[in-house]
Image (cartoon, rainbow, N blue to C red):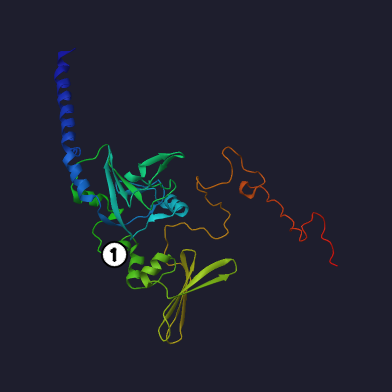
């Protein structure tokens, strides 16, 4: 090796070591065992208000760098198929915390998987075999879910307030009431309208009830193929509001004022990030993978059945009133 290049090579080595040491000093340390125990004690059994909907089923939410997945249309599709475990503004309890390699797992309301109690494992035997003293339903679906708070590579040292700030998109630890927690999740225009007890065209049912309360009167009507509900607020000699909802959306608002003036609003005033499907849409309905069926294991569906896209079978003739195969005998 040429001695002239040795000083430059030595400088490069020292510079690389210095850069690596500087990066190590900037990176936060891994979470310690004591911090792990302190966080579990601090947050376990804590009551929180929900800021994002959680779907039912075994799939919960993932939170990384402030972004929630699934979200948007995928989340709304899961909510439509399985239903919500909790909705924004609901109160939930953190029932389990698990610190893993690169994430902290928070279960709410018992989690998404039903666990057996210790006494449900006890069995006694007899002539007919083994029987559990407290059998459980294996298909029972608890109204719980979970969220995974994911970090880059590993879980760092955290203060309780830092963890609360990271969980802010899904949990609210500081809300004074469910209404406050729910309003904090809404766009400013809708939030201001609810605080003024006003209804806007495009709101959903939860927003209308947050603004006006439960309707004293409901009327179900049908306009052609469109089925809707009319929620009526107020009685003369006061202003009377007629809120028309088609599905989960306000499509028309009519107000009869005391002086006899009628005000009608039908143009959408707010847009929600919730895809809706009109009744009678050609898009097929999503069928859960574990939906019950009458077919035996391995049996293929009938190609002529309506579920398989075939033609429906012709209706059977009405039963013979005389109990005979041939035509009924004429009366005497």
Where is residue 265? Give x, y as percent: 46, 73
Q: Is residue 6 above or below residue 48?
A: above
Q: Is residue 195 above or below residue 137?
A: below
Where is residue 21? Give x, y as percent: 16, 31
Residue displayed at 27% across by 51% down: 167
Q: Secondary structure at mark 1?
A: helix
Image quadrant containing the N terminus? top left
Q: Mark 1, residues whose alpha carbon is within 10 Å: few (<14), some, or many (≥20)? A: some
Q: Is residue 100 left or right of residue 328?
A: left
Residue displayed at 84% across by 61% down: 329
Q: Is residue 13 left or right of residue 146?
A: left
Q: Quick one: 189 or 75, which is closer to the camera?
A: 75
Snapshot quadrant of residue 223: bottom right
Where is residue 4? Give x, y as percent: 15, 16
Badge count: 1
Snapshot quadrant of residue 64: top left
Q: Quick one: 213 or 299, which is closer to the camera?
A: 299
Q: Quick one: 51 or 146, which is closer to the camera?
A: 146
Residue displayed at 18% across by 30% down: 20
Q: Is residue 258 left or right of residue 226?
A: left
Q: Is residue 32 at least partly visible in the picture?
A: no
Where is residue 222? Give x, y as percent: 56, 70
Image quadrant containing the C terminus? bottom right
Q: Is residue 277 at least partly visible in the picture?
A: yes
Disc 1 designates what residue? 180
């Amino acid at each position: 090796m040429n001695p002239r290049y040795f000083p430059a090579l030595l400088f490069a080595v020292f510079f690389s070591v210095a850069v690596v040491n500087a990066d190590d000093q900037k990176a936060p340390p891994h979470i310690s065992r004591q911090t792990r125990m302190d966080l579990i004690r601090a947050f376990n059994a804590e009551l929180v208000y929900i800021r994002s909907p959680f779907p039912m089923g075994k799939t919960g939410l993932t939170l990384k760098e402030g972004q929630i997945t699934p979200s948007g249309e995928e989340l709304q599709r899961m909510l439509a198929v399985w239903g919500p475990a909790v909705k924004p503004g609901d109160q939930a309890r953190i029932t389990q915390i698990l610190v893993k390699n690169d994430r902290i797992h928070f279960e709410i309301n018992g989690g998404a998987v039903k666990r057996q109690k210790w006494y449900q494992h006890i069995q006694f035997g007899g002539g007919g075999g083994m029987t559990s003293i407290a059998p459980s339903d294996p298909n029972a679906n608890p109204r719980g879910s979970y969220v995974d708070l994911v970090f880059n590579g590993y879980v760092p040292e955290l203060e309780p307030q830092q963890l609360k700030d990271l969980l802010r998109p899904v949990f609210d630890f500081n809300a004074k009431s469910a209404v406050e927690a729910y309003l904090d999740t809404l766009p400013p225009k809708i939030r201001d309208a609810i605080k003024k007890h006003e209804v806007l065209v495009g709101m959903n049912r939860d927003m209308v009830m947050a603004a006006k309360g439960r309707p004293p009167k409901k009327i179900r009507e049908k306009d052609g193929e469109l089925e809707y509900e009319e929620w009526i607020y107020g009685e003369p000699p006061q202003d009377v509001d007629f809120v028309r909802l088609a599905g989960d959306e306000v499509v028309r608002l009519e107000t009869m004022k005391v002086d006899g003036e009628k005000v009608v609003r039908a143009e959408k005033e707010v847009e929600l990030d919730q895809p809706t499907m009109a009744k009678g849409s050609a898009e097929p309905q999503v069928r859960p993978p574990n939906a019950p069926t009458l077919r035996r294991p391995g049996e293929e569906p009938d190609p002529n059945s309506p579920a398989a896209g075939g033609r429906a079978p012709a209706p059977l003739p009405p039963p013979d009133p005389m109990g005979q195969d041939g035509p009924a005998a004429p009366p005497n």
